[in-house]
Amino acid sequence: MRDLFRWAERYRRANFDDELIFESQRSTSKFYPSNHSKNGTIGVTLFDWDAFLAEQGYLLLAGRVRRPEEARVVAEVIEKVFRRPIDEEKLFDLTDHTSPSTRHLLEMVMDSSSLAKEQDSSNLDSVVWTRDARRLFVLIGTAIKYSEPVLIVGETGCGKTTMCQFFAALQKKRLFSVNCHQYSEAADFIGGLRPVRHVRDQSSKVVYSKDVKFNI
């Protein structure tokens, strides 16, 4: 249910996304140029909202599954409802037919070497952009674009931290990393309360924090 609301929110916010509309016009102008007539009328590039909804639904729902056959089931259901094909090549490969929903993200991938030089980071320069790496980048980038929280789950070395470093470099933000283990608890980060013996023998100290007073 939560992903369905996110799906709808992406559609709402896309109505005000001028960059998305521009990418659609740029990618389809070679097929329907606006300065030529088509069937006696001036050719106009229209944005395919059904294709946009189908692709965003696939990115949201299929991005959570771990097996290719499960992702295929998600794609088949979406294709049946929206009557638009789901092609991972258009979503995760930068070609002349790349989807306008993901083109701007894939163009960042192609320019990653210059970003690595700008940030003077050898980790970013050594990234090999395989299909899985581009897929992870697109999923994270799309979630960030629509202000959605991201939870990355995977084995050690699959590129989780590297992707976070890449997006931090893109936005020129400082990345803070906290390493946890199986025995980590919330108290390790926010502190905890400990019983104090012989309270009467100790002088009571008062700590003020904004409008709250604590007796220690």
Image (spheres, helix red, strand yellow):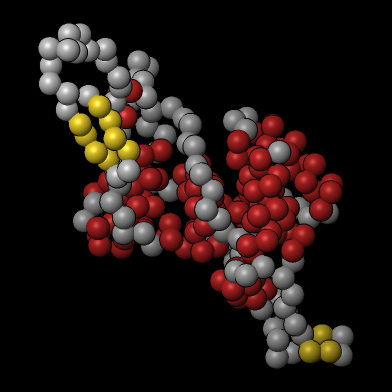
Residue at the location (66% across, 42% down)? Answer: 3
97 versus 121 height, above or below: below
Nearer-the-camera pick, 192 or 50 = 192
Residue at the location (66% across, 40% down)? Answer: 2
Drawn side of residue 181 relative to residue 154, left or right? left
Whole-percent x and y of residue 140? Answer: 50, 47
Examine the image and state in which quarter residue 29 appears: bottom right
Q: Is residue 56 visible?
A: yes
9 versus 180 height, above or below: below
Examine the image and state in which quarter residue 37 appears: bottom right
198 versus 171 height, above or below: above
The residue lying furthest to the front in this view is 200
Nearer-the-camera pick, 142 or 123 = 142
Nearer-the-camera pick, 192 or 24 = 192
The residue lying furthest to the top in this view is 197
Q: Is residue 127 visible?
A: no
- The image quadrant where one finds the C terminus is top left
120 versus 72 height, above or below: below
Examine the image and state in which quarter residue 100 appears: bottom right
Whole-percent x and y of residue 83? Answer: 83, 54
How many discs appear?
0
Residue at the location (70% across, 91% down)? Answer: 35
Whole-percent x and y of residue 127? Answer: 35, 47
Residue at the location (28% across, 51% down)? Answer: 174
- The image quadrant where one finds the N terminus is top right
Whole-percent x and y of residue 194? Answer: 27, 15
Drawn side of residue 150 relative to residue 21, left or right? left
